[in-house]
Amino acid sequence: MASEGNSEEVSNRQVILKEYVSGFPQESDMTLITSTIKLHVPEGTSGVLVKNLYLSCDPYMRGRMGIVKGFFFDPFTPGSPIIGRGVSKVLRSRHPDFKEGDLVYGMTGWEDYSLIAATQNIYKIQDTDLPVSYYLGILGMPGLSAYVGFHYLCCPRKGEHVFVSAASGAVGQLVGQFAKLSGCYVVGSAGSKEKVDLLKNKFGFDDAFNYKDELDLDTTLKRYFPEGIDIYFENVGGKMLDAVLLNMRMRGRISVCGMISQYNLEQPEGVCNLTSLVYKQIRMEGFLVSEYYNTYPKYLETVLPYIKEGKMEYVEDIAEGLESAPAALIGLFAGRNVGKQVVAVARD
Amino acid sequence: MASEGNSEEVSNRQVILKEYVSGFPQESDMTLITSTIKLHVPEGTSGVLVKNLYLSCDPYMRGRMGIVKGFFFDPFTPGSPIIGRGVSKVLRSRHPDFKEGDLVYGMTGWEDYSLIAATQNIYKIQDTDLPVSYYLGILGMPGLSAYVGFHYLCCPRKGEHVFVSAASGAVGQLVGQFAKLSGCYVVGSAGSKEKVDLLKNKFGFDDAFNYKDELDLDTTLKRYFPEGIDIYFENVGGKMLDAVLLNMRMRGRISVCGMISQYNLEQPEGVCNLTSLVYKQIRMEGFLVSEYYNTYPKYLETVLPYIKEGKMEYVEDIAEGLESAPAALIGLFAGRNVGKQVVAVARD
């Protein structure tokens, strides 16, 4: 490729996983080191060398920080950089689909520069009218998760009552907006007043509450859903799920996108009200968005106009600098992020 | 109607619920009393007067013995007879669809004779070649439950691996046989050596185990399903479900017919492994067979030939006499029944 002329060596900061984590992860489980990298794609290979611009912090990454039985991704390698989704700029390419200057999103390393051999996991960004970090959120995996989990698994009908937990997060804020666009009544829960205000004032939820202010979630849900819940979009698990099960309506649907409250527990909480599944004929279904990637082009066709016409909003929480990445990732599990958590490594 | 001539008064034994039950029900929660009844349908009504032949003991009846939040049936009335499914002979009728001597099945009282006003809940037995008590089992609600829960909810494919709990019970024994007829590999669990032998030798399960002999159900399931479970037909809940969740395969289906291990607990057991729903994209769905009654004629067309051609077996546990009904019902929750529990009140 033409872009292979220059192969200067540059400094490359990397966020390394020190060792496997059990229980609640800490910033100190990761460390920032500085090595060097040649801005060069080895001859005889077909990879790309990218400069990372934005990195994505996603709850599923907790599962890769340790050995989790049955987890759908391999664990990270201690001593190596964290791997996650990112938006990057191509500096060098030996692959015909990518050229110098292209913006791409997909799996990359938590470092300034990455040599990506697995180009099947990166995609060229075609539409650059919107903030490119959106490809880590509304225009990427979390967006498709919200769409698939809500529309395909829950089959919403106009007028149905929808509850979303972790509702201001990367996925939840979109589920609420998809629910409103489908003519549903939607209530969200989140963990701070600021987030609750966002839900009501920015994302158009009909109502919202701070679960940390509530003594008894069953009573809370009865207050917000006196006639019960038709659709629950599950992001948290544990106590919230138990309370929701008591408040579902007949033939309710629960889409299980994640259970963030459980990921750091040595022993997960028990969910006691599963007999409701029988009494109320509830369908509860987990999904991995990776199984639905074939629907992504159709999703983009749907959602790009929504954003450009102002029918959907998206809120990101952008941490500045690679050095802030460990705190940003850990912050997800304490709910410190307000909106989709992204790390800005470089602006271009 | 012609059959309304004779209205003699006869003695009528009744099994009465004394008061609402909480926790594990006891025989002493019910009592046998003797009253009288006129063999007569009051003028101006359109009911039937029946002699009860067989009464059905079903786990869901536990839910009617107390106040269970969200339960799909009203509770029984303390001081009145238990209500359940039965096979009965019509002695008097003022309804055009029923005549003296007809055999019917449907909701009746736990007593020698019942005046049934709600004739929409009884059905005339058309095919009397088989034991009529089968209308409380393979030809009735449990049979349709097994068929719907397995075929409609689990969508079995040939070669898939199926696990059935409470597998020798009224429903479980049929699920196993439907699974074999669908070309699946099927393993059942039950609570005694006698039941395990039945599963393997009578019902054609590929394998079976006594859960009471197992120290760790996760290990047990790994032994019987080294490659995992595609379909779980859930009758018990609690610890078994937790172990199953760890052993499901990707895109597994769980049909939740009941959770008998939980019905008598003041505080249900917690199920801890629900994150598997996400990791393995599992669909878990509860159902009430009453929602599928429209499919019953088609079910009968399927299953009657199976029985007559010897392709399916059915095992009943018949308790003799109305006086044995309380013990028979309570016995369900201790697993004392071997096969479908029925009470024979009279043979004709």
Image (cartoon, coloured by chain):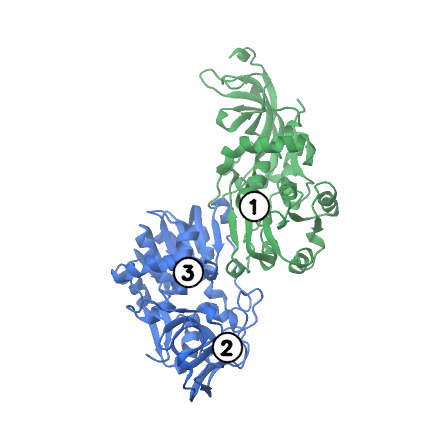
Chain colours: A green, B blue
Q: Against B16, is A112 above or below?
A: above
Q: Nearer the viewer, mark 3 or mark 2?
A: 2
Q: Residue at x 68, y 57 (%)?
A: A220
Q: Position of residue B93 (x, y in %)?
A: 42, 77
Q: Which three-letter amino acid code belongs to the residue tagged 3? A: Ser
Farthest front residue?
Answer: B2
Question: Are dots 1 and 2 on a single chain?
Answer: no
Q: Against B169, is B329 above or below?
A: below
Dot 3 or dot 2, earlier in sequence: 2
- Residue at mark 1: chain: A
- Closer to us: B197 or B106: B106
**For the residues marked 3 and 1, what is the alpha-carbon distance in whole angstroms?**
31 Å
Provide the residue designation for mark 2: B45
Provide the residue designation for mark 3: B145
- Residue at mark 3: chain: B
Query: Tag on residue A258?
Result: 1
Q: Which three-letter amino acid code belongs to the residue tagged 2? A: Thr
Q: Residue at x 55, y 60 (%)?
A: A273
Mark 2, secondary structure of its residue: loop
Image quadrant where one finds the C terminus of chain A: top right
- Closer to us: A292 or B132: B132
User: Is there any visible trace of residue B140 in the rendered image?
Assistant: yes
Q: Against B24, is B289 above or below?
A: above
Whether tag 3 and tag 2 are in contact, CB under 8 A, the answer is: no
Q: Position of residue B292 (x, y in %)?
A: 45, 58
